[in-house]
Image: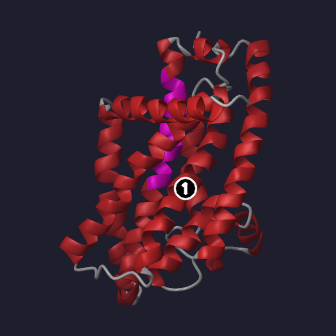
Amino acid sequence: MTGRSPTRLRRLVVVGVRTHLLHLSRSGVELVMAVFSPLVYATLAVYLFRAGGHPDRLLQAAVGAGLMGVWSSVLFGSGGAIQDQRWLGTLESLVIAPTRLFLVLLPITFATALVGMYSMVATIVWGTLLFGVPLAPASPVLFGPALLVCVVTLGMLGAFMASTFVLLRNANALANALDYPVWMLSGMLVSTAALPDWAQAVSWVLPTSWAARAVQAATGGGAVLLPAGVALLSGAVYMVAASMALKWVEKRARQAGTLALT
């Protein structure tokens, strides 16, 4: 790696995130999902927690609904980005470009995670203004860093998901199937203790599970640094796996001729 490589990589990520944020801002479907879905999640979560006799956990309910919105944004954004590139006829150009495809996909997933952060802000503001949810996290100093760790971790997992979407002509079909199971297994809204033993075992290998634990601990009390560290470490492992998998995916897509839409 040359001395200019870190600078070029940083510029690639910054420009890629900015470009994709502008692209997402022009998509009516993305805007509708980003604006309204988190509010629906937050409303249902607050009513469910109140009906269940847990009025003291309303802030955790709002935060959990926000995490669900962030994950949905990353998942559908990553799948939609690959699909958009295929429809526009630019996916082949991205694959054969000198820059590795993994580095091209990484800013896309981080951009969708940043868009998803609106979900977190919206659910908290919506719950505070409409339902009187007290905005008093147990660890106010660590709450912001925990949210940042969550965004980075979700972006890492999104990069891993996006590496498989290259092979699929209809990536959104896979995204639809992965939305509900991942946020359930991650304990974003409901504790994983309520899941079967085999499902709890699966949750231990998901970086989103540890990121959600860090955010929920910062909200309701508990250890924050340990789950945040595990989330970043496991997310890095998924990043390495995504980079390796994408090399095989590129080769397989070229052999099968599945890069183009037709």
**Amino acid type assigned to the residue bearing label 1 in the image:** Tyr
In this view, the residue farthest toward the left is: 129
Residue at 53 percent across and 44 percent down: it is 75
Q: Position of residue 243 (x, y in %)?
A: 73, 36
Residue at 72 percent across and 39 percent down: it is 242
Residue 75 colored in magenta in the image: yes
Tell me if residue 221 comes above or below residue 10 in the rendering.
below
Tell me if residue 78 comes above or below residue 85 in the rendering.
below
In the figure, residue 21 lies in which quadrant?
top left
Mark 1 surroundings within 10 Å by alpha-carbon count, few (fewer than 14), some (14 through 19), many (20 or more): few
Q: Is residue 257 left or right of residue 50?
A: right
Magenta span: predominant SS is helix
Q: Position of residue 169 (x, y in %)?
A: 60, 23
Magenta residues (range) = 70-84
Which one is in front, 166 or 110? 110
Q: Position of residue 195 (x, y in %)?
A: 66, 74
Say how many tags the image has: 1
Residue at 27 percent across and 71 percent down: it is 127
- The residue under label 1 is 180
In the rendered image, which quarter contains the C terminus? Answer: top right
Q: How is the image coloured?
A: secondary structure
In the figure, residue 229 lies in which quadrant?
bottom right
Tell me if residue 140 comes above or below residue 236 in the rendering.
below
Disc 1 secondary structure class: helix
In the rendered image, which quarter contains the N terminus? Answer: top right
Q: Position of residue 56 (x, y in %)?
A: 37, 89
Q: Is residue 206 visible?
A: no
Residue 24 colored in magenta in the image: no
